[in-house]
Amino acid sequence: MEFRELKVPGSWEITPKLFGDPRGVFLEAFKEGPFVEAVGHPLSLKQANSSVSAAGVVRGIHFADVPPSQAKYVMCPRGAVLDFVVDIRVGSPTFGQWDSVLLDDVDRRAIYLSEGLGHAFCSLEDDSTVVYLCSAPYAPGREHGVNPLCPTVAIDWPTTGRDGSPLELLLSEKDTDAPDLMTAQEQGILPRYDQVQEYLASLRA
């Protein structure tokens, strides 16, 4: 299992070693030792979620108040999604920047997003299934979003699916109505970089 930190600090691409034979494939989807070595603290699992999405479905950009926010270890056991991490931490050197990882049922990579980061993905084929291991339970009053089509963030959303067919992006009403990054900052709902760093330090202590 290999961890590669993405260009948004606090997020990692995780590539498992696949063991295949005529019966199929075996892999370690999560392993505490390599995780702690890369991230600096254990993953305290509080909730596990799963979503199934049609081709073109966009979910995000979602985040939660810090503390405790909600770190996510995300996998795609069926289908394919392009998964995005967005730096929404006000005061961060990479504020407004994003990076992406292809999650699919071939390479079976995962992505980990630590507390205070924004998360989104786009499904690249019908019935793509995403599993999230979360560090905190869902709390409606603490959950927020940034519009995934925000021109400041300017995510390069895919235009074709895994089979090469054109993709038509499909957003929920909630995500469509979410504020852009600058408006969210003005509203005071974005996490502060110093606050996030202080909370992460408490997890490592």
Image (spheres, rainbow, N blue to C red):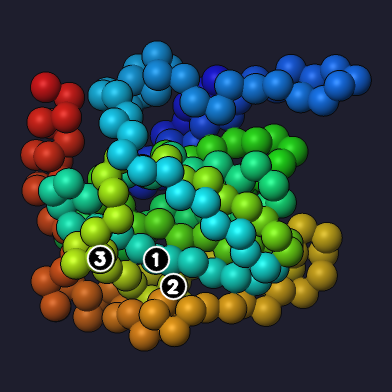
| Picture layout, residue 162 above or below residue 25 | below
Q: Horizontally, is 114 left or right of 119 in the view? A: left
Task: Name the residue rendered at 69%, 35% in the picture.
Answer: 107
Indicate the quadrant where residue 158 lies: bottom right
Indicate the quadrant where residue 26 lies: top right
Quadrant into which the N terminus falls: top right
Q: Earlier in the sequence, mark 1 or mark 3?
A: 1
Circle 2 residues within 10 Å: few <14, some 14–19, many ≥20: many
Q: Residue 101, percent across and down?
A: 55, 47
Q: Earlier in the sequence, mark 2 or mark 1?
A: 1
Q: Residue 123, percent across and down?
A: 63, 62
Task: Name the residue rendered at 65%, 36% in the picture.
Answer: 108
Residue type, mark 1 in image: Ile
Q: Residue 84, percent across and down?
A: 48, 55
Q: Mark 1 points at which residue?
A: 61
Q: SS class of the residue under badge 3?
A: helix
